Image: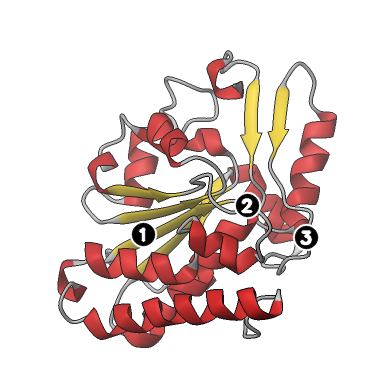
Amino acid sequence: VVVNKSPAVTRIYLPPDVNSLLAIADHCLQSTDYINVIVSDKQKHLQYLDMDDAIKHCTKGIGIWEWASNDNGSEPDLVMACAGDIPTKEALAATVILREHFPDLKVRFVNVVDLYKLTPASEHPHGLSDKDFDSLFTLDKPILFNFHGYPWLIHRLAYRRNNHKNLHVRGYKEKGSINTPLELAIQNEIDRFSLVIDAIDRIPALKVAGAHVKEKMRDMQIECRNYAYEYGIDLPGPD
């Protein structure tokens, strides 16, 4: 509904952690004459950024997380993008899995706080220029975008961008009810295992070489869902 309103007054933010939430909330509470939407979970989550880095990241609205990327100085094989707390956690976990199994794979990790950064600058005052968007998301590399919302919204905002044809969005599919967090993510295919499978399917060099890893990811999905069904909690393991 908010996206249908005038871009002069609408703002949508998806902070990835608590410090980012504080930075965004401070900004919104000081603003006037805007409709500010903040999308945030009520559960405890991992903390990725210290306060200074969170303020910088939220001020930019979008950016590469250098510590989660390994493409510095070269073109990435994959752009892993995300918006939202749970999608960020799962995208980070997927990146770790990919780099563990494919050490030569170059992954660029992009986090989006200000959703309107995806739109062209001509359509929204917060929109990125085409040059900046192309620099972040490349002109021809596969993009996996993990989103805390309906996938079509990302396509709607970014459909005029140069690399939209390689943009693949995972998001809410209206699945799940009383589930554990990871089980719900698996049902909506925004979990780390689904993202790894997607990456293998979309990176030419991995389509055949990644077959064994895909099998392992499917096995992990089954194991996690069975554990959640039996014990009512997610399978213990590192976040």
The image quadrant of residue 80 is bottom left
Give the x, y percent position of residue 2: 61, 22
Q: Position of residue 118 (x, y in %)?
A: 45, 37
Q: Secondary structure at mark 2?
A: helix
x 31%, y 29%: residue: 160
Question: For the residue carrying disc 2, how many other residues have a C-alpha within 10 Å: few (<14), some (14-19), or many (20+)?
Answer: many
Tell which of 32 and 195 is nearer to you: 195
Mark 1 — residue?
79
Q: Secondary structure at mark 3?
A: loop
Closer to the chain start, of discs 1 and 2, is 2
Residue 65 visible in the snapshot: no
Q: Is residue 37 left or right of residue 221?
A: right
Q: CA distance from mark 3 to mark 1?
A: 27 Å
**Tags 3 and 2 in contact by the CB under 8 Å rule?**
no
Sequence order check, earlier mark of 3 and 2: 3
- What kind of element bears circle 1? strand
Q: Which residue is mark 2?
A: 57
Rendered-image quadrant of the C terminus: bottom right
Please, which residue is most extreme toward the front here? 230
Going 63% across and 33% down the picture, which residue do you hit? Answer: 12
Q: Is residue 188 visible?
A: yes
- Decide: few, some or many residues near mark 3? Use Cα within 10 Å; few <14, some 14-19, many ≥20: few
Neighbours of disc 1 within 10 Å: few (<14), some (14-19), many (20+):
many
> Is residue 193 positioned above or below 29 on the image?
below
Residue type of the residue flagged with mark 3:
Gln
Q: Is residue 194 left or right of residue 2?
A: left
Q: Residue at x 55, y 78 (%)?
A: 226
| Percent of width and height locating residue 201 | 24, 65
Q: CA distance from mark 1 to mark 2?
A: 18 Å
Q: Which residue is mark 3?
A: 43
Q: Position of residue 39 (x, y in %)?
A: 68, 42
